[in-house]
Image (cartoon, rainbow, N blue to C red):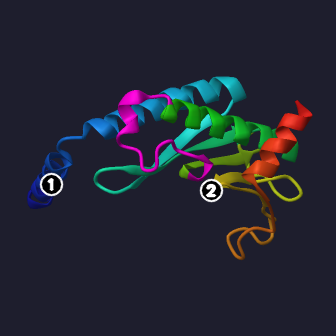
Amino acid sequence: MTTYLLQLFLLAAFLVAGCGHISDEIKLARSIMINVAKTLEQRYQIKIIGFSEAGDKDYYNKIGLEFNVYRVLSKDEGREILIGCTEELLKSINSNSELQRYLQPYPFIVENVDIALYVYQLDGSDTYYPDISVITNWGGKIEFKTESKELKHKFGYTTREKESYEEALKIVRTQN
């Protein structure tokens, strides 16, 4: 038992030591993501659950945020929140002069920002067809996905509706 605990401690110490230095660009990008997430949580009553980053050792080419939503959303409401989140993240990324040199391309465009909204009932239980379960902006493509209780975790989504970001933005602007 003592040997096991010692090995576990050494493994943990090695992993922590290996984490080492976080680069300035990572600190900066994550600071922006955290600030944007806080703003969006307040604005839309959503809860941040994660972020994503992609690129190489010198540049970011994609940054994203993921949120839980604890109320059923109509397609129009989900679209409006998704567009609002995307626009806010893009604005914050592109307006930060310190981050610009770490972006490839600069300025970031819609295809460089990923947003996901995972929709749950008010009580936290899963949302099923006909209600929307997931709304995403991946690479400038908007998707609305539903799940059925019977097929959950077996065959993917029950329905998937897609529209371009430009179509979604036009709809939101028309409705406002």
Frontmost residue, 19 versus 7:
19
- Determine which residue is flagged by label 1: 5
Give coordinates of residue 89: x percent, y percent.
57, 36
Of 41 and 30, nearer the camera is 30
Task: Reply above or below: 111 against 152.
Answer: above
Asked if the stretch drawn in magenta spans residue 30, the answer is: no
Image position of 107 (left or right of 172): left
- Looking at the rendering, the stretch of residues picked out in magenta corresponds to 95-111
Looking at the picture, tell me which residue is in the foreground, 152 or 119. Answer: 119
Task: Compute the Cα span from label 2 to label 1.
Answer: 43 Å
Classify residue 109 as left or right of residue 59: right
- Vertical arrangement, residue 9 with respect to residue 46, above or below: below
Q: Amino acid at mark 1?
A: Leu
The percent position of residue 31, horizontal first and vertical second, equals 41, 30
Q: Secondary structure at mark 1?
A: helix
Upstream in sequence: badge 2 or badge 1:
1
- How many C-alpha atoms fall within 10 Å of the one at disc 2: few (<14), some, or many (≥20)? some
Q: Residue at x 63, y 49 (%)?
A: 116
Residue under the point 33% across and 57% down:
56
Q: Tell me, yes or no, if residue 66 can be seen here.
A: yes
The amino acid type of the residue labelled 2 equals: Trp
Mark 2 lies on residue: 138
Q: Is residue 73 above or below residue 34?
A: below
